[in-house]
Image (cartoon, grey):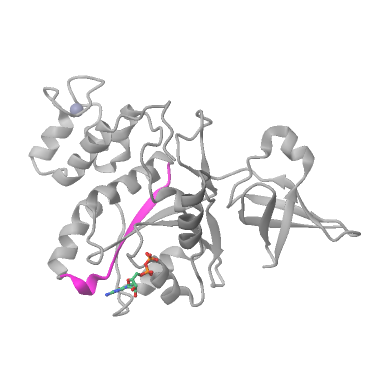
């Protein structure tokens, strides 16, 4: 019998695809005892120990190592209905295009809130920059840079910003998300050769037919430093996700210096008098567009009983 440390690349119950530290890929099943112990919630990105039965040659997942982080579509921490998209994600990378399709700041903000709500760092990629003026790119980037997010300006077509983005991805597990058509596959192909996102087609065809959610897939990066990209269909059509409404303001990093300074402790930063966040918007210290995103998201008051598949 041989044992190895491995990472779960894909799978939806039943059979899981794992990749060992040596770079071998195997199909493996979860040991029955682990299922019974309530640790059957294995997720893509989990680090596991696998053992190979000498006689049958079958691989079994015998241990799930402690998670560093969880990207879930509902409030983390065991809240009712938590849905784990992937474990051990280091960062969320939100990709938008400067044109074709037009950037959608509100949607970008929503993805960033999801990252913040999961306690994950995030970076923004603005692709197809050759289709816009530098001034337009800077204008779109400014509120995010002010909020502390790294913003990559890239063009696959003109080979702009690719090296810096590659450096930001290698050695880490990155959940790559963004609307379709913005160039996610093109970027990954330009950065890492034959790497392909697979879940785009899968999620669309399967989600139409059934009410199941197709899991994310971890794609190894072709680099000596390692790293993975998680393609996350589950984040693309995110609606409500169970983040308590009163936590939303903390998910806008540039609001944080003002939180706790409003007249009312439970200020929703809407129409309340003496709201420090609104004052910061009026003084120009906080972006009005970001504040409007906050209000829109806050108005979508998450209803914990609502299902959003
Ligand atoms: P995805 O759905 O996000 O994976 O997007 P794709 O990678 O499939 O790209 C969608 C389209 O945008 C394709 O026709 C690409 O050739 C094109 N594209 C990708 N990057 C760029 C870019 O930097 N500039 C321009 N003009 N087109 C791009
Ligand atoms: Zn306030």
Residue 13, visible in the rendered structure: yes
Split into quadrants, the picture shows ligand 1 in the one at: bottom left
Q: Residue at x 43, y 33 (%)?
A: 307
Q: Residue at x 45, y 48 (%)?
A: 234
Taking 173 as reference, is 182 left or right?
left
Taking 55 as reference, is 286 left or right?
left
Magenta residues, as a range?
A: 119-132
- The residue sitting at the front extreme is 209
Along the line of sight, which residue is nearer the eye, 128 or 288?
A: 128
Residue 138 on image: x %, y %? 17, 62
Residue 130 forms part of the magenta stretch = yes
Residue 259 forms part of the magenta stretch = no
**Image quadrant where one finds the C terminus:** top left
The total number of labels drawn is 0
Residue 130 on image: x %, y %? 22, 74
Q: Is residue 227 above or below residue 256?
A: below
Residue 231, visible in the rendered structure: no
Taking 170 as reference, is 243 left or right?
left
Q: Is residue 142 above or below residue 239?
A: below
Q: Residue at x 43, y 42 (%)?
A: 119
Q: Residue at x 44, y 53 (%)?
A: 91
Taking 41 as reference, is 166 left or right?
left
Residue 248 on image: x %, y %? 31, 34
- The residue sitting at the left extreme is 283
Along the line of sight, which residue is nearer the eye, 273 or 27?
A: 27
Along the line of sight, which residue is nearer the eye, 87 or 261?
A: 87
Residue 127 on image: x %, y %? 29, 67
The answer to which image quadrant residue 1 occupies is bottom right
- The residue sitting at the bottom extreme is 158
């Amino acid at each position: 019998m041989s044992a190895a440390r491995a990472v779960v690349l894909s799978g939806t119950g039943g059979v899981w695809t794992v990749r060992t530290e040596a770079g071998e890929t195997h199909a493996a099943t979860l040991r029955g005892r682990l299922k019974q112990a309530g640790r059957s919630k294995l997720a893509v990105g989990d680090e596991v120990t696998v053992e190979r039965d000498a006689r049958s040659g079958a691989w079994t997942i015998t241990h799930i190592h402690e998670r560093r982080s969880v990207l879930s579509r509902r409030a983390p921490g065991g809240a009712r209905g938590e849905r784990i998209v992937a474990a051990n994600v280091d960062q969320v990378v939100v990709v938008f295009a400067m044109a074709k399709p037009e950037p959608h700041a509100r949607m970008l903000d929503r993805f960033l809130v999801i990252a913040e709500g999961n306690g994950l760092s995030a970076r923004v990629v603005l692709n197809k920059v050759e289709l816009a003026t530098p001034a337009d790119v800077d204008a779109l980037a400014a509120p995010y840079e002010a909020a502390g997010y790294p913003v990559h300006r890239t063009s696959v077509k003109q080979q702009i910003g690719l090296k810096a983005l590659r450096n930001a991805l290698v050695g880490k597990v990155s959940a790559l998300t963004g609307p379709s058509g913005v160039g996610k596959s093109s970027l990954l192909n330009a950065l890492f050769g034959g790497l392909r996102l697979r879940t785009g087609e899968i999620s669309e065809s399967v989600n139409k037919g059934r009410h199941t959610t197709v899991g994310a897939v971890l794609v190894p990066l072709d680099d000596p430093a390692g790293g993975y990209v998680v393609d996350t269909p589950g984040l693309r059509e995110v609606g409500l996700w169970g983040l308590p409404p009163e936590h939303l303001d903390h998910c806008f990093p540039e609001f944080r210096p003002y939180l706790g300074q409003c007249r009312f402790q439970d200020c929703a930063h809407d129409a309340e008098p003496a709201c420090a966040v609104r004052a910061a918007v009026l003084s120009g210290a906080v972006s009005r567009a970001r504040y409007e995103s906050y209000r829109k998201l806050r108005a979508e008051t998450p209803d914990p009983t609502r299902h959003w598949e």
